[in-house]
Image (tube, rainbow, N blue to C red):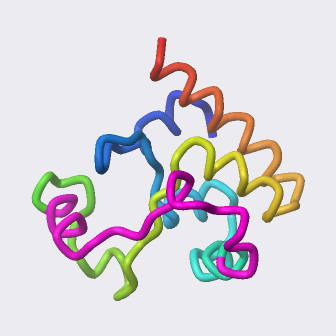
Amino acid sequence: MEPEQIKNKILEIRGKKVMLDMDLAKIYEVETRVLKQAVRRNIDRFPSDFIFQLTEIEMQHLVSQNVIPTLNHFGGAKPFAFTEQGIAMLSSVLKSKKAIHMNISIMRAFVMMRQ
């Protein structure tokens, strides 16, 4: 996936540029539950400025803004939102070659947004 495509997955929530766990899971080609499980097993690597869980109100806001089609899209679980630093930390938790390669593209997308 190209940085330009990834850029479209970067959202602003709580005044921070973030990506949702389900979008990252697709990019890394893993199941969302696997990504979340890896994070929970390494939670010390993810302080609150790297990752946070969306509230019901934030989830409803994403649906009302047509970012997400319906609440069912979340699969019943509250998604994690990863900041740029949290995404960088994911590469140390998801150790596949795909994760490393895609992490580079994601970092480039964040840089593109700042320029």
Q: Nearer the viewer, residue 19 or 69?
A: 19
Residue 34, quarter of picture: bottom right
Q: Is residue 20 above or below residue 1?
A: below
Rendered location of residue 6, percent (x, y): 52, 39
Q: Is residue 38 above or below residue 87?
A: below
Q: Is residue 60 magenta?
A: yes
The one of 69 and 106 positioned closer to us in this rendering: 106
Residue 56 as seen in the image, left or right of residue 45: left
Q: Nearer the viewer, residue 41 or 74?
A: 41
Residue 43 lies in quadrant: bottom right
* Residue drawn at x 38%, y 42% as measured from the top left: 16
Instruction: In the rendered view, tell whether residue 109 sits above or below residue 47.
Output: above
Residue at x 45%, y 64% (from the top left corner): 52
Place of residue 56 in the rendered image (x, y in percent of width and height, measured from the top left) = 22, 76
> Residue visible at 41% across and 40% down?
17
Stretch in magenta? 40-63
Residue 58 pos. (x, y %): 22, 64
Using residue 109 as the reference point, say whether residue 100 is left or right of it. right
The one nearer the camera, 14 or 27, is 14
Residue 57, magenta (yes or no)? yes
